[in-house]
Image: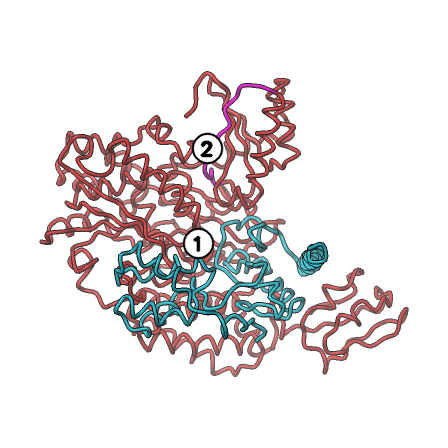
Amino acid sequence: MAATEKSLESEAIPYETIDRVLDTYKGDPSAIIPILQDIQEALDYVPKEGIGYLGDQLGVSPAKIYGIATFYAQFRLQPKGKHTIMLCVGTACHVNGAKLVGNTITDELGIKGGETTGDGLFTYEEVACIGCCSLSPVMLIDGETYAMLTPKSTRKILKDFRGKTDEQNENE
Amino acid sequence: MHDHDKTLVKVGLSTCGIAAGGYKTYDVLEKELEKADIDVSLEKTGCVGMCYREPIVDVITPDGKLFSYGDVTEENAARIVNEHLVQGQPVADLLMNEEREGVVGTQNRISLRNCGIINPESLEEYRERDGYKALEKALKEMTPEDVIEEVLKSGLRGRGGAGFPTGLKWRFTRQNPGDKKYIVCNADEGDPGAFMDRSIIEGDPHAIVEGMLLAAYAVGSNEGHVYVRAEYPLAITRLEIAMKDAKEAGLLGDNILGTDFSFHMKIKKGAGAFVCGEETALIASLEGERGMPRLKPPFPAEKGLWQKPTCINNVETFANVPWIIYNGAEKFAAFGTEKSKGTKVFALAGKMKRGGLIEVPMGISLRDVIFGVGGGIRDDKKFKGVQLGGPSGGCVPESLLDTSVDYESLVKTGAIMGSGGMIVMDETTCMVDMARFFLNFVQNESCGKCVHCRLGTKRMLEILNRITEGKSQPEELELLEEIALNVKEGALCGLGQTGPNPVLSTLLYFRDEYEAHIMDKRCPAKVCRELLTYTIDPELCTGCTRCVKRCPTEAITGEKKEVHVIEQEKCIKCGNCFDACNFDSVIVE
């Protein structure tokens, strides 16, 4: 898998963020889910190495927290790429060819659903219905909707996107 | 907050409207209105249900005349301001009043009564349409028992899918002893292809607050939780605004409307687990645990959240309640059939001409829903089947299209009412692939607690994968059926008990498609890639080498300006050549 592993090795435990979140919930162990949600909102992911500390503070075993963090689809234990592609794989999009669009994304970027490109540029996620069934198949890139996709249009969108990003990088 | 002497301009800004570019439309309207310097009031509204026409803009004159515009792109938005609002000339080619009348006018809207009409962020507009009058009526004129009696009389049944009588649930919760009781609103709408609950919360959040207040008064509770999917950020925001406004107006909190009835509400964000739609799993998740279901009984009405009597209802159920209390049970019960009263909201999607949200009386036929309100099949292709109830439901074939939409009749077909997702499929949909799609979903979402669901669905999925890849043996069909029946019988909760339904119903009605895959290694709908053959039509091929370059396995030979040929042994059926060809010369069979 081409996921970025770099921030996993070296990043220090974000004590400050965890303490601040714990404070809002007064260390309530039944609030593990909202605590994890707030940590992810602040850091964009739940750092694995923070789980032990979190467990100590709550008086709950790290295994339990890890279990919850991996049970729910919302939590990410790795940081996201710069741009997030969310491909809708709800029923309506499936019927209208979301799988072909997904294959195209995989072919173009070399990553499967749930992975991030090696250069940390794109994270590709497959998500349940995002509610624009009448525009299906649909994907969101950084929140912007791209509708009625075909393999052809998908490839063009990704190419254009990559081109734009390269330009920005040169300018920076 | 608007003033009725002004013309109103409303932009549909629910998730569907926003996805179609509603905010851009809104911005252009705002800018153009400012430029034109005319005094109209620009507002947001929810989803009127015609998602296929979003962004939708309504212009309402002070005398109440409605001009409804569809497909309002940025360009069209400027035209509406300049032609209609400045020059007083409605933009005829964008108007869809007639179409709206045909789609929305033919429905009976109770849960959706305010969606797409009021500004969901305005308490005042909700109150103008009889909002919180049911609460007032209940607190001043009715005892809690009266409220329960009224809901029972209305015949309202749980709209989450199972169809348990709502009034009975409330009575049990009231009768069970407990120093504390909870109300929970299940807004963990996880069925892929269903968006009824989201649209209701986004379009009319006060209806949920009022519905929960009425339930709380009836069962004797002072604390409620709304469990909403985190994927519905807009719904959460609008509900938060509604709760804040209601609290400030003395409609929520302590001593509501000056009585000794108090009720406090909290929102809990779900974290993405389909199984949490199951009530005991939802309660576990509310308590901060993994969302795993447990054996019932005891039912939540006896031992629910924190082991206290808990009344859990679905969003749509709550949205019906204020209307029932205010208008009376008889009016509600006048809609529907003997055992299924009232109306039901459906999310129409798939190969529909008019995808969107509709609310129709129970007892209407599937045909009337799909070919009447829904406008029939996209591109006038041939209808094949309709999937009801998502991954827990089943597929109804054309021969049963005259089935009445009510809880009992749908179960007889092998489908279920479910929460209201209706996915329409045409001749280009492969039913084996559909069954595989739903089973894959169930497999992924199985919480892993019970063996039948965890392993049974896995084995079933493996068989379906083999069938769609052309690698299966004839005897596997019987094995598939056997495992399916075992999972149905042995699983602990609703997810596993209903998960095999899509497989069983497609096996019942579309067995020939399974057999074509297994015996003839052929996918009649041309969907299962491994069973397709790609060839190049020598007449149409120009020898441009586009496909040669895109083939990942070098299976295509041929120099520039020569006819290309695909070597079948090397072809992995990725479809790249088909997508690459500009001359339609790649044939798929």
- Nearer to us in this view, A99 or B341: A99
A47 lies above or below B26: below
Q: Position of residue B84 (x, y in %)?
A: 61, 22
Tag 1 subunit: B
B52 lies above or below A118: above
Label 2 – label 1 distance at C-alpha: 31 Å
Q: How is the image coloured?
A: by chain
- Residue denoted by label 2: B105
Q: Position of residue B546 (x, y in %)?
A: 80, 67
- Nearer to us in this view, B567 or B579: B579
- Quadrant containing the N terminus of chain A is bottom right
Q: Is residue B571 visible?
A: yes
Chain A colour? cyan
**Which residue does the image show at 58% across and 42% down from the upper left?**
B21
| Residue B231 numbered mark, or none | 1
| Left or right of B213 on screen, residue B485 | right
Residue B38 on the magenta segment: yes
> Magenta segment, which residues?
B37-49
Tag 2 subunit: B
Chain B colour? red
- Quadrant containing the C terminus of chain A is bottom right
Q: Earlier in the sequence, mark 2 or mark 1?
A: 2
The residue under label 1 is which amino acid type?
A: Glu
Q: Nearer the viewer, mark 2 or mark 1?
A: 1
- Nearer to us in this view, B104 or B256: B256
Q: Position of residue B220 (x, y in %)?
A: 14, 45
| Left or right of B20 on screen, residue B252 | left
Q: Residues within 10 Å of mark 2 (few under 14, many from 20)?
A: few
